Amino acid sequence: MKGAQQFFPELLSAQATMLLFLPLAHVLAKAIQCCAVGTGTVVGHTTIPDLQRDLASFRPTVIVAVPRVFEKVYNGARQRAHDEGKGRIFDAAADTAIAWSRAQDTGGAGLGLRIRHAVFDRLVYTRLRAAVGGNLQAAISGSAPLGERLGHFFRGSAWTVLEGYGLTETTAAASVNTMGTQRVGTVGRPLPGTSLRIADDGEVLIKGGIVLQGYWGNKEATAEALEDGWFHSGDIGELDDAGYLRITGRKKEILVTAGGKNVAPAVLEDRLRAHPLVSQCMVVGDAQPFIAALVTIDTDALAGWLERAGRPATDVADLVDDPALRAEIGAAVEDANKAVSRAEQIREFRILPVDFTEEGGEMTPTMKVKRAVVAKTFAADIAAIYNTPKPAGTPTA
């Protein structure tokens, strides 16, 4: 608790109001709430379906959430702008915010960029800040990596999203970004008394007083997880020259194609979910000749898309093979492919008739996709990708 107060004095105080989206069964939410009790911070609890209503009424100074919440905020703002015929303005404002944020890491923005940023602050960014109550100073993102593009967008437009990294086995955070020392796209540097290193296979290893001593009654699991005091996290990552940690994927989620190419799906999935029409996605291709993806559609965004196109309202299930929808998702796939090498690119995708949900068993309470469940539930769809010719509108490498 003392460490959290030291790292986030601006965010944890008697004057702060914190809105939590993480369930208290999550170690980060539990740790943050204990810190809030110690500092007198007012805490509210909410869920993603109540996101817009509670942000506006509670008016938090800080929020703690999973990346999907920030994706929903961005996608919702972009969708509203396009529905109002102001899509080009919003997209230009987003590009400016990202460029402005990147420039902060390389000496600051030039005159032209500063002017554009000031103009869009009045036209777009103030409305974004107002949509979350107008008091938000910063946000803390946990549970999974936030896409670098979204991190720069929020820092350049509305508020700073601070990413940290840790597991239940490390008593929440092992590394963290702070307001004064942030590198967007990383999960920060290790906390005092904690050491990080990268194993030969890319796995993140953690050592320090925060690491568990062992799993209760399970010596075999303990022996697998701990080696000479180093905890094997199961995550794949990189340490830069200043000691900032970047998480690139989960070891058990790495796909190995039939050609022997190792592919970390998170990079592609993060970019795909940045498109307003995309709700969830899962990259597949283990032991297959190429990489593909299952995509689900955000029904709220779909309604606006249909209206702008002058088309009648209908269910996603009726549109999975619709050429226009496939072209829209195909463009998002092409954009995601720019982030990876040719061999890692998505060659085909399939739009699913239903979304992944916690109730359906495909999502965890912290909005992570349960890959094994999705692979089993939609096995026929995955098989169809590799056994049938490409439908029209499918991206090609």
Image (cartoon, rainbow, N blue to C red):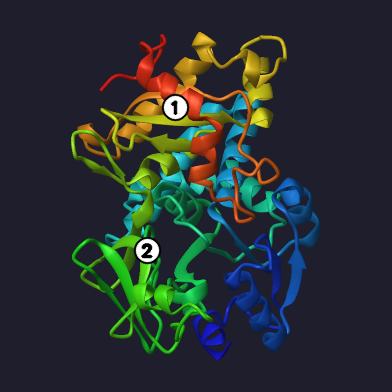
Q: Quadrant of residue 267?
A: top left
Using the rendered view, name the quadrant where residue 78 is placed.
Answer: top right
Q: Which residue is label 2 attached to?
A: 234
Judge by depth and name the residue closer to the eye, 331 or 356: 356
Reply above or below: 82 against 16: above
Q: Position of residue 111 (x, y in %)?
A: 34, 50
Q: Quick one: 291 or 16, which is closer to the camera?
A: 291
Circle 1 SS class: helix
Provide residue 118's location: percent of width, then percent of height.
49, 49
Task: Determine whether, in the image, residue 360 is placed left or right of residue 242.
Answer: right
Q: Which residue is pictured at 25% across the width and 23% down the height?
A: 397
Disc 2 residue type (three-letter): Gly
**Of the numbered discs in the image, which one, if any, rests on residue 382?**
1
Q: Check the image and report above or below for 115 versus 308.
A: below
Question: At 41% across and 37% down in the image, what residue appears?
Answer: 283
Q: Nearer the viewer, residue 120 or 142?
A: 142
Q: Nearer the viewer, residue 53 or 123?
A: 53
Q: Are marks 1 and 2 in contact (CB under 8 Å)?
A: no
Q: Position of residue 209 (x, y in %)?
A: 43, 89
